[in-house]
Amino acid sequence: MFENKPPQKPLLDDLETAEKNPEIFYKIQLAALRMGRKFGFSDTEMEKTLGIRLHPEDRQDKENLQRSPAPPPSLSADHLARLDSLCRNLSIHRLLIMGDIPASAPPEIVVDWPPAMPSQAASRFFALSEGLEAIFGQSVVLIELGAVTQSARKDEIARNALEAWHA
């Protein structure tokens, strides 16, 4: 059934060979950098992770690989009134929206609120999620602003999010 084939050369040996050739190794690192960008990592974060310094021409193509900004959400007066009530009831400091409402994909809702006890935090999180889904008539992706740690993600929120409510 199965033929006995000699084992293929391990990947580690190939990487060791690539490390000896700086041009090939840099191309591998650049490919990893581009993949990191697709997942929202900044060039600086990827340089630290990969232990390299980018050539200026490679830094310039960063603009071409960034995601295009999300269109600003469209909120009706009814949405705003219902958001005001929900946010006041749950002691929210700020509520930001990324994406269109209504949209085919769930919008990302970024929330900034005061710390709470774990038991209260969970019930507050689900109350907000359910309230937003009732207001917008679709599921939402809820993101706690304080839990965002990646600088690229923070930058994306700063660029693309529209403040829908603040205390």
Image: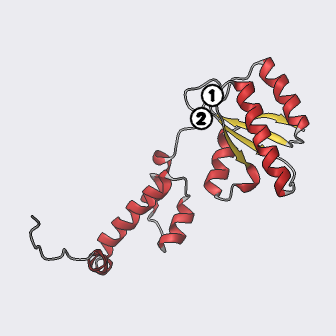
The structure's colour scheme is secondary structure
Q: Is residue 31 left or right of residue 97?
A: left
Q: Is residue 24 left or right of residue 39?
A: left
**Residue at the image position 9 percent from the left and 64 percent from the top:** 1
**CB within 8 Å, label 1 to label 2:** yes
What number is the disc on residue 70? 2
**Residue at the image position 36 percent from the left and 69 percent from the top:** 26
Describe the element under mark 1 as helix, strand or loop.
loop
Q: Is residue 73 left or right of residue 40?
A: right
Q: Nearer the viewer, mark 1 or mark 2?
A: 1
Residue closer to the observer: 165 or 92: 92
Q: Earlier in the sequence, mark 1 or mark 2?
A: 2
Residue 113 x/y as whole percent: 84, 47
Q: Residue furthest top?
A: 77
Pointer 1: what residue? 100
Instruction: From this view, report whether residue 159 is shown above or below residue 81.
Output: below
Q: To which quarter of the image does residue 72 belong?
A: top right
Q: Quadrant of the C terminus?
A: top right
Q: Is residue 23 left or right of residue 158?
A: left
What number is the disc on residue 48? none
For mark 2, does the 10 Å Cα neighbourhood hold few (<14), some (14 to 19), or many (20 or more) residues? Answer: some
For mark 1, does the 10 Å Cα neighbourhood hold few (<14), some (14 to 19), or many (20 or more) residues? Answer: some
Residue 106 x/y as whole percent: 60, 33
Residue closer to the observer: 114 or 96: 114
- Between marks 1 and 2, how big is the CA–CA gap? 8 Å
The residue type indicated by label 2 comes to Ala
The residue type indicated by label 1 comes to Asp
Describe the element under mark 2 as helix, strand or loop.
loop
Q: To which quarter of the image does residue 18 belong?
A: bottom left
Instruction: From this view, report whether residue 124 is shown above or below residue 135.
Output: below
Residue 69 x/y as whole percent: 58, 37
